[in-house]
């Protein structure tokens, strides 16, 4: 088996692995989202911190002041 024939085989196995992995994880995420006993995310609006409310004290950095020459 030469290099030209093994590359497509490796590509197909890699693609199959990625698709199966994505489908399994999609099912797990959907099951977790449907479970009412799972704690809410800290970033969710109805979560423990009320969404991104903990960022309200954050200020944008001031513009850099450069010396005029």
Image: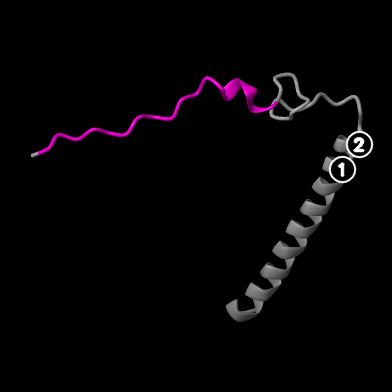
As displayed, is residue 15 above or below residue 49? below
Q: Which mark is residue 34?
A: 2
Q: Quadrant of the C terminus?
A: top left
Q: Residues within 10 Å of mark 2 (few under 14, many from 20)?
A: few
Q: Quadrant of the N terminus?
A: bottom right
Report the residue at 73% width, 57% height from top. Answer: 18
Q: Magenta span covers which residues? A: 51-68
Q: How many marks?
A: 2
Structural distance between the alpha carbons of marks 2 and 1: 6 Å
Q: Nearer the viewer, residue 10 or 42?
A: 42
Overall secondary structure of the magenta stretch?
loop
Choose top left, top right, bottom left or bottom right for residue 66: top left
Q: Nearer the viewer, residue 52 or 15?
A: 52
Circles 2 and 1: CB atoms closer than 8 Å: yes
Choose top left, top right, bottom left or bottom right for residue 61: top left
Q: Is residue 65 left or right of residue 7?
A: left
Report the residue at 85% width, 26% height from top. Answer: 38
Q: Which mark is residue 39?
A: none
């Amino acid at each position: 088996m030469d290099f030209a024939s093994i590359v497509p085989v490796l590509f197909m196995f890699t693609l199959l692995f990625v698709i199966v992995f994505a489908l399994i994880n999609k099912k797990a995420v959907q099951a977790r989202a449907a479970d009412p006993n799972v704690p809410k995310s800290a970033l969710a609006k109805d979560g423990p911190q009320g969404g991104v409310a903990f960022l309200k004290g954050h200020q944008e950095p001031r513009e850099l002041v450069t010396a005029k020459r």
